[in-house]
Image (tube, coloured by chain):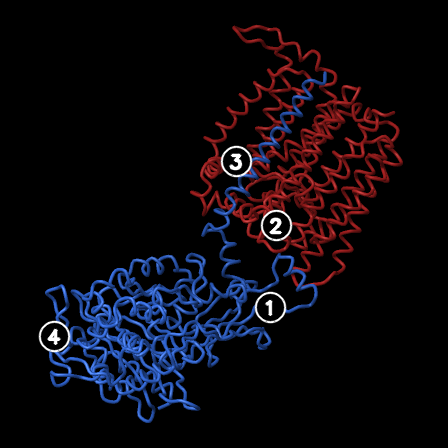
Chain colours: A blue, B red
Amino acid sequence: MNIPLRRAAYAILGAFVVLVGSIGYIQAVEGPNLRDDPRNPRVVAWRTGRQRGPIVSADGVALANSTPSISDPKLYERQYPEGDLYAHTVGFNSVLYGSSGVERTRSADLVSDRDSTISGVLTGLLGGDTRPRGVRLTIIHALQMVAAEALGTQKGSVVAVDPTTGAILAMVTYPRFDPNHLIGPDAGSAGQILETDPADPLRNRAIDQTYAPGSVFKVITTASGLDSGLVSPSSEFDDPIALELPGTESTISNYSDKVCDDGTSVSLELAFVRSCNTVFAQLGMDLGGNQLGLTASAFGFNAEIPFEFSVLISRFPRPATIENDPAATAQSAIGQRDDRATPLLMALTAAAVANNGTVMAPYLVEEIFTSEGTIESSTETAIWRRAMSPASAAALSDMMEQVVISGTGRKAAVPGIRIAGKTGTTEVTGEAPHAWFIGFGPVGAGSDIPQIAIAVVVESGGDFGESATGGSVAAPIAQQVLAAFFGV
Amino acid sequence: MTRRAETGLIIASALLAAIGVAIVEFTRGNWLNAQVALTFLAFAMSFGAMQFAITRWATGASSLLLPIASFLTSVGFIEIYRIDSDLAALQRWSLLIAAVSGAVLLWILRDSGCAVLRRYRYVILAIGVGFLLLPLLPDAWPIHGSTVNGSRLWVRIDVPGTSRVLSFQPGELAKVLITVFLASYLAERADAMSVVDRKIGPFKFPEPRHLGPVLIAAGAAFLVLIYQRDLGASLLLFGIFIGMLYIATGRSFYVMVGTVLAVIAAFAAYSAFDHVQRRIEAWIDPFGHYSDAGYQTVQGLFAMGSGALTGSGIGLGRPDLIPAATTDFIFAAVAEEMGLAGSLAVLAGFGLLVAAGFGVALRSRDRFRKYLAGGLTIVIGLQAIIILGGVLRLLPITGLTLPFMSYGGSSLLANMVIIALLLRVSHEERL
């Protein structure tokens, strides 16, 4: 009489076992997929709907804000008032595309502590401040605007850094995108357009793109020569119309296809000011690939730059590949062949000269502040590398100042401010040359120490095309930024 | 388990509900408030009243049932409170009324025992069927049916002289009354019905007249399906009929005939009704019907998936995004905020409750009480399986409340009556 009852019980309890398996599968196995499904409104609500702290520039301009949503007062909407200007630094926080920039790296500070974690609950219970924190960047908005305007619609990048601290003062890349479009209702189509755009507006060219550095690399070659004691600024070099490369049929000539000075001999300083390839190719061969490679490493080539975001590693050929190949060494010494550098590293190269040979670790976030405005933590500056001796840096500084006074970098001159710089015009096969300028100011010591170092790169000649040079395209951009910085 | 342990577990459940409410208030930025105390009081008083009734009028009753019922009620209540605190306030009153009703039922049965139910079985059947048909009353009448979400399950009573309306789902109680009737009917007829010796070809059949109840069951369930458009209730009703026939006769013949009838009915319903078609399609591919019929299922899946192992935390998820989160989809809300840990606890609770209910039935010496306890346990178990299967996408979604956990006074009342009857049956075995 109890047998059918038992069977019914087993059937129902068996069904519960199936339910247990099913809920286990849904929550433990399928859970992450369901949670992250873009149609899941929780994704919108929690990833983007929470209040996030503000992100402001060094001069206090709001770069990212959260305001209560009109449709649902419990949710917040994120705005980027400066549009595309900070798309690659502030970044975005999007349902569809995740987060990027400081929005990603400082997300833990930007969202409220009042969450389900034990520490969050305890902090709240103990009366601690669980409201989202704000992030202050090192970027000066006024400078960022000038840099963006100076670069205009030319592909490339402008990076400005405080040489004594490593604080990034401006970081502009073009083309850009408006992060507001990636968080709105049309985020899907806007993102697709960006992802398929051949101009690659999603790429931060300041850190995620390397270019052959060309003649700006001569700063490093010179530093190598000075540091190793092989040469001084007054050392004399032969002045051929073209330098024959040993073991090859090819030659290296100067940009103008002329001699550097009088055709007999030329000083290192004058060659630097006029950016003569023949002299620096010869210096490179005299130094050898090994020595050159050591100096390049000291400046940060082949190394990861410690930064808010991961930075593409800049490359200088390994000594083994060029040590017994004078031709390759010669080309590497003038920033061609396989040399590749990010604009950020080139800005740090200028900063190294400005800061007595010491490279500070670059940083983008000045401080984290509470909702009441008090500073919770601020970034401590740190030395990243010692690129060269202070004496070499001082000598290079003088040479670079001459570049702006009388050489290829005259268009970077700022009235009343001693500016140092170096131009570069990179030969690119089948394309117009990339135009480079790196520099800093004011040149000096004591109370008049350099306050800003800058790197400008304009891809494929920019608006000038084939006729572009570092001096004609990049230097004027740097000039505008420097002039704005010094209030001239 | 002793009465003392039972008391302890009831208080623990009341504390659970109160702590849940406190957590919800905390996530809203509030401190402990009156809601926490009111919740504790409501739970302690409700289940306390039931236990008081046990100690007075059913001293031998099983001590397993009340703690599990109070646990499930608490977990469901926390989510109701989290989703809609106003509903939760009403639910507290419903709980008190339901529990007091259960206690009163124990008092009514104190001397006569379950046997009195047997004596009045046709009255009970009449009331049960009447309740079932009550929602069909025309809208213009003072007591009238009401169509909600396409199903005509509700009855509303216009309170004279005011604009207030009392509404309840008589179907919830009807299933209990019909189960009581079936238990007593089968206690007399089971022996005759279990004779299956008429051969037609290779198949054996019982006497044709014994097939009557099965066909009545199928007919009643199908009528409910057609007129009230309630898939869940008709499936449940049908399952109760077939399940009780099986436990009474031990003949799988009835289960097979029932299954065949159910499949035919399902096909008929599928081809006849658009809303059934949409539900089936949304069941097979809910994501493909995301914007219409599959929306609720998908939102439930999103909620459960987002909960993952440990859940978002009470008050920190978004169960309010699920349609019918306080009623049919309360389980998805629990799963989101309490995670797999919480959902497994709920399933374990139902498993224990069903096991305890069948335990009562197995120990019964009297046929009627055995079928009654077994049938009532099937009601709870099957109802949980049908709605949980729908939420978990094992079955098409059908509107049913999850016993003890869903918001709804009628549902709570019916389930408390079931618990009271199970308690009484278990008591009578010890007499």
Q: Disc 3 is attached to a residue of which chain? A: B
Q: Position of residue A350 (x, y in %)?
A: 34, 78
Q: Is residue A144 visible?
A: no
Which secondary structure, mark 2?
Answer: helix
Q: Which mark is residue A242?
A: 4
Marks 1,4: beta carbons within 8 A: no
Residue A113 at x, y = what percent? 60, 63
CB-based contact (under 8 Å), mark 1 and mark 3: no
Q: Would you call the spot at circle 3 few (<14 residues within 10 Å), some (14-19), or many (20 or more)?
A: many
In the picture, measured across the screen, residue B163 lies left or right of residue A95, that is: right
For the residues labelled 2 and 1, the Cα–Cα distance comes to 22 Å
- Dot 1 lies on which element? loop
Labels 3 and 2: the sequence-earlier one: 2
Q: Check the image and report above or below for A440 versus A18.
A: below
Q: What residue would you read off at disc 3?
A: B396
| Chain hosting mark 1 | A
Q: Could you give the CA–CA distance between mark 3 and mark 2, rounded to whole angstroms?
A: 24 Å
Residue B119 showing in the rendered view: yes
User: Few, some or many C-alpha atoms within 10 Å of disc 4 (few <14, some 14-19, many ≥20)?
Assistant: some
Horizontal arrangement in the rendering, residue A201 relative to residue B374 (left or right): left
Q: Gap between marks 2 and 4, in whole Å?
A: 76 Å
Secondary element under disc 4, as helix, strand or loop, is strand
Is A347 or B316 nearer to us in this picture? A347
Q: Amino acid at mark 1?
A: Arg
Of A362 and B194, the residue lying toward us = A362
Q: Which residue is mark 2?
A: B337
Are labels 1 and 3 assigned to the same chain? Answer: no
Amino acid residing under circle 3: Pro
Whether callout 3 and callout 2 share a subunit is answered yes
Q: Which residue is mark 1?
A: A131
Which is nearer the eye, B116 or A411? A411
